[in-house]
Image: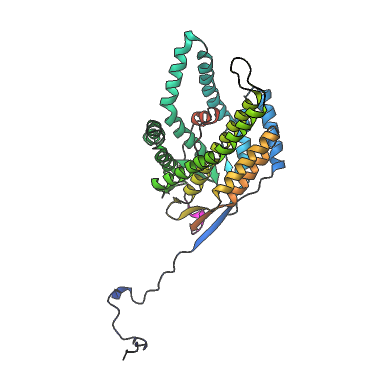
Amino acid sequence: MTERPDLTPPSPLAPPPPDVPREDLGRPVAPAPAVETHPMSFTGQAGEYFRIWIVNTALTIVTLGLYLPWARVRQRQYFYGHTWLDGHNFEYTASPLALLRGYLIVGAFFLAYSVSSNFEQTFWLAGVIGVLFLVLYPWLVMKSLRFLTASSTHRGLRFRHHGRAGGAYTSYGLANLAAGLSGGLALPWAWFMQRRYQVEGAAYGSARAKFRGDVGDFYVIGLTGLAVSIGGAMLLAVPVVGLLFLLGLLDTPASVGGVPSTGIIAGLVAAYLAFLTLYGVAWQYVRAATLRYVLNRVEVGGVVRTAATFSPWRLVWIGVTNTLAQVLTLGLATPWAAVRRARYVASGVQVRAIGSLDSFAADVTPDENALGEAATELLDINLGF
């Protein structure tokens, strides 16, 4: 017969279990730390930002680009100021004059490169400037990250980036070289190295950030983007070939000299635009999925973690429709597109903290020059995060 379990409560005089030290008996058990979730939000409005954008655009054109640093600062101050976390908004504190100095230096080199590359006598100078840019590219990225973080505050506390030149040359020099030489096979590893450099060099006050990502997950993201490209191309191939064949039958014959007919040219242009859109969709997915992945694996000071719940595919849809709206409105929908994307991303980001965000301590933030920031802006260097 099966024995019934003994449900008699233990005697208070009974000896303690063997796995509980006697010195810990009678001590109150500390409750588990409470985790507070702080959702992020964006309160900007398209009409409100349109007024800033149109003035920035007009003054930049009238001043032949000299107003660009002020336009950049006003733009970021608007988006930072309307991004809220735990009842406090972010702030962008960069000086337009500091940006102007960097813009003038980088602009002078870019102008010298453009002019010298058009003349055979000075073509060597263009080569020297091109090589110099490739050599300095990782250093410029490092300087840009330092300037951007040092110009960003929340609750009166500055962010900071501690990244060193050695890490920048490994992540943005060696990794990019490996990606190119491997025909793209090492590209996800380069993404991983660059995101790890960006995150692990960052700090909020004296609290350092930690990246919990793995390189294998970046290969999954890359392969998904590749599958979208290949699968979409195969689906487009049949109607495109059929369209070209139909246009070839209906259109007039090719003119003398083998020049394709108007219908064939139009079909080729349509096919090119379709495949270009497909590539854009795949690349936007990679960027959106990478952003979500990174935000879900950032830890700050051992007590704060970020989380992202937005859908990468929804972000792709927003990107595609934003681009279409901008094209159809000749750029006038740009403010609406920027506000729309910022609102969606912010609504899907949360910060989970053990305790209050007020507990972080300030750190001494040295002044950073804007040369790297100017290079990323003028030369369209995409940091990707």
| Residue sitting farthest toward the front | 249
Q: Quadrant of residue 161?
A: top left
Front in this rendered view, residue 74 or 28: 74
61 on left or right of 149: right
**Residue 190 in the image: x percent, y percent?**
41, 38
**Residue 42 in the image: x percent, y percent?**
62, 48
| Residue sitting farthest toward the bottom | 1
The residue shown at (45%, 19%) is 129
The residue shown at (60%, 52%) is 347
Front in this rendered view, residue 375 or 185: 185
Q: Quadrant of residue 137?
A: top left
Q: Quadrant of residue 262?
A: top right
Q: Main secondary structure of the magenta part?
A: loop
The residue shown at (54%, 25%) is 101
**Residue 53 in the image: x percent, y percent?**
68, 35
Q: Is residue 27 above or below residue 220?
A: below
| Residue sitting farthest toward the left | 18
Q: Is residue 276 above or below residue 294?
A: above
In magenta, the rendered stretch is 354-363
**Residue 119 in the image: x percent, y percent?**
51, 10
Task: Identify the image quadrant of the N terminus.
Answer: bottom left
239 on left or right of 305: right
The answer to whether residue 61 shows anywhere in this view is yes
Front in this rendered view, residue 94 or 308: 308
Residue 235 falls inside the magenta stretch = no
